[in-house]
């Protein structure tokens, strides 16, 4: 997830800034130069050298340390929230996929039974036990059952693609399911 990676990178940056803020002693500053003093008609000039060493007696970068600690805690909370959102969206997508896969499997079973209904209706029509309207109605019902099975299978595959889009590649066996083999597939492990 790009947002999660950005938050983790920002957290690392804030952690480094927090370490920098916790340093209370700084490297001494050395200055070297040339100075000219004029006091009325007299002029004095010569080299000047100096060392500046800051001794933190009172401040010790407390405000900056507290600010960095607050930023770090806020980022940790945002990361935890994003991880929970990702886990819940993964779980919801997985449940939708499993439900659609189970429905596609059940519809495939009904579609398989439709062949025997068509065979029986054709035999009844040939023997004169039913008229043409009954035979055509049986054909329409069988066709509708097969279309429903195909639509549920397509919806299950679309849910699988959405699941893959969330967190990576899915099990290749699930991607190649046909409506008749959907029930034979195992469940997939959750990715974190």
Image (spheres, rainbow, N blue to C red):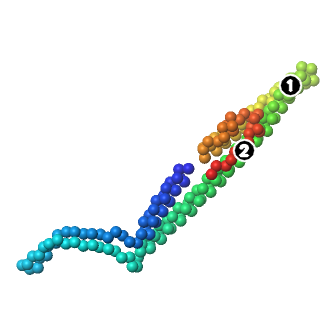
Please provide percent x and percent y for residue 148.
Answer: 75, 35
Can you name the residue that lies furthest to the top here?
126
Q: Closer to the observer: label 1 or label 2? A: 2
Task: Give the residue at x 66% y 38%.
Answer: 172
In-image side of 177 versus 25 (left or right): right
**Vertical placement of residue 130 versus 174, above or below:** above
Could you classify mark 2 by the number of other residues whose Cα lies within 10 Å: few (under 14), some (14-19), or many (20 or more)? few
Say which element carries label 1: helix
Q: Is residue 185 visible?
A: yes
Q: Is residue 154 visible?
A: no
Please provide percent x and percent y for residue 141.
Answer: 81, 31
Task: Give the residue at x 22% y 69%.
Answer: 32
Decide which of tag 1 and tag 2 comes sooner along the chain. Answer: 1
Report the disc number at residue 119: 1
> How many numbered marks appear?
2
Q: Nearer the viewer, residue 17 or 151?
A: 17
- The image quadrant of residue 154 is top right
Q: Nearer the viewer, residue 179 or 169?
A: 169
Task: Give the residue at x 41% y 74%.
Answer: 60
Q: Nearer the viewer, residue 17 or 118?
A: 17
**Vertical placement of residue 171 versus 28, above or below:** above
Q: Which residue is mark 2?
A: 187
């Amino acid at each position: 997830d790009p947002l999660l990676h950005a938050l983790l990178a920002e957290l690392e940056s804030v952690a480094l800034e927090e370490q920098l803020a916790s340093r209370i002693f700084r490297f001494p500053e050395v200055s070297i130069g040339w100075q000219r003093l004029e006091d009325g008609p007299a002029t004095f000039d010569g080299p000047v050298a100096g060392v500046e060493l800051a001794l933190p007696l009172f401040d010790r970068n407390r405000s900056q340390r507290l600010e960095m600690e607050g930023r770090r805690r806020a980022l940790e909370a945002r990361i935890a929230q994003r991880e929970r959102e990702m886990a819940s969206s993964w779980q919801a997508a997985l449940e939708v996929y499993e439900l659609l896969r189970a429905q596609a499997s059940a519809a495939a079973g009904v579609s398989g039974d439709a062949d025997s209904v068509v065979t029986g209706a054709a035999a009844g029509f040939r023997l004169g036990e039913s008229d043409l309207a009954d035979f055509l109605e049986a054909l329409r019902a069988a066709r509708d059952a097969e279309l429903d099975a195909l639509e549920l299978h397509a919806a299950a595959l679309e849910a699988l693609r959405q699941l893959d889009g969330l967190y990576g590649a899915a099990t290749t066996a699930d991607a190649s399911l046909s409506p008749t083999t959907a029930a034979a597939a195992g469940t997939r492990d959750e990715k974190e």
